[in-house]
Image (cartoon, rainbow, N blue to C red):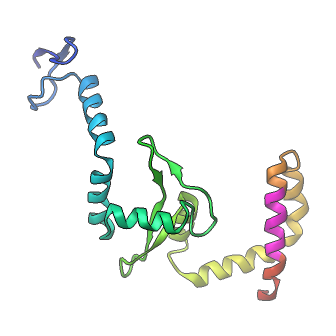
Amino acid sequence: MSQRTCKACGTSYKEQNLKKEKLCRTCRNAKRNEYKRKNYPATKSQQLQFKYGITWDDYMSMMEKQNSQCAVCNAPAKINTYGYPVLAVDHCHATGKVRGLLCDNCNKAAGLLFDKSNYAVELCKYLAGHVEDKEVIHFSVNRNQKAKHYWADYWAEVENLRWWG
């Protein structure tokens, strides 16, 4: 490996690849990140088109229809380092059809249930059948007021689901 001088910052570095950019790693990363920041919608559109067959405009239209919230739990979209809202694109693995935008947790849950709605129903039945654990869970989150409200809402929903069991 030969020693080179970075044309941007003037530091000396070892040439590790055959690219002739003449930039050190730090300057090369900064250049790449600047490009990504300036061209985020275009590069994201390419990714969306390749993976799901939708464009950036389609994605943002879905985001707007969902008020930048998860379609399942209404969690707000995270804002990425480039200042754009981000939700996962939910799609049917069998047909490839895009269904909506989900937060990471709901997207993982849908994937773990193998996109089978009967699995989700069975899981709800299972959870509704274990209501006696309510006091133990409520005690463990007793210090956090937000968690109290969450669990109160959760158990109200479980009571509504009891007709399944």
Task: Give above or below for 109 relative to 83.
Answer: below
Q: Residue furthest top?
A: 11
Which image quarter holds the C terminus? bottom right
Task: Give above or below for 41 relative to 154.
Answer: above
Which SS type dominates the magenta stretch? helix
Residue at x 89%, y 69% (from the top left corner) = 132
Asked whether the viewer can see residue 56, the reply is yes
Q: Is residue 52 left or right of residue 136?
A: left
Q: Quadrant of residue 105?
A: bottom right
Q: Is residue 11 left or right of residue 78?
A: left
Residue at x 68%, y 76% (from the top left corner) = 123
Q: Is residue 59 left or right of residue 163?
A: left
Q: Position of residue 157 (x, y in %)?
A: 79, 74
Asked whether the viewer can see residue 130, the reply is no
Q: Position of residue 18 (x, y in %)?
A: 9, 31
Q: Quadrant of residue 44?
A: bottom left
Q: Is residue 152 magenta?
A: yes
Residue at x 23%, y 28% (from the top left corner) = 28
Q: Nearer the viewer, residue 125 or 52?
A: 52
Q: Is residue 4 left or right of residue 114?
A: left
Residue at x 79%, y 76% (from the top left corner) = 128
Total numbered labels placed on residues in the image: 0
Task: Give above or below for 136 relative to 36.
Answer: below
Which image quarter holds the N terminus? top left
Q: Position of residue 111 (x, y in %)?
A: 50, 69
- Residue range of the region highlighted in magenta in the rendering: 149-158
Q: Position of residue 150 (x, y in %)?
A: 79, 59
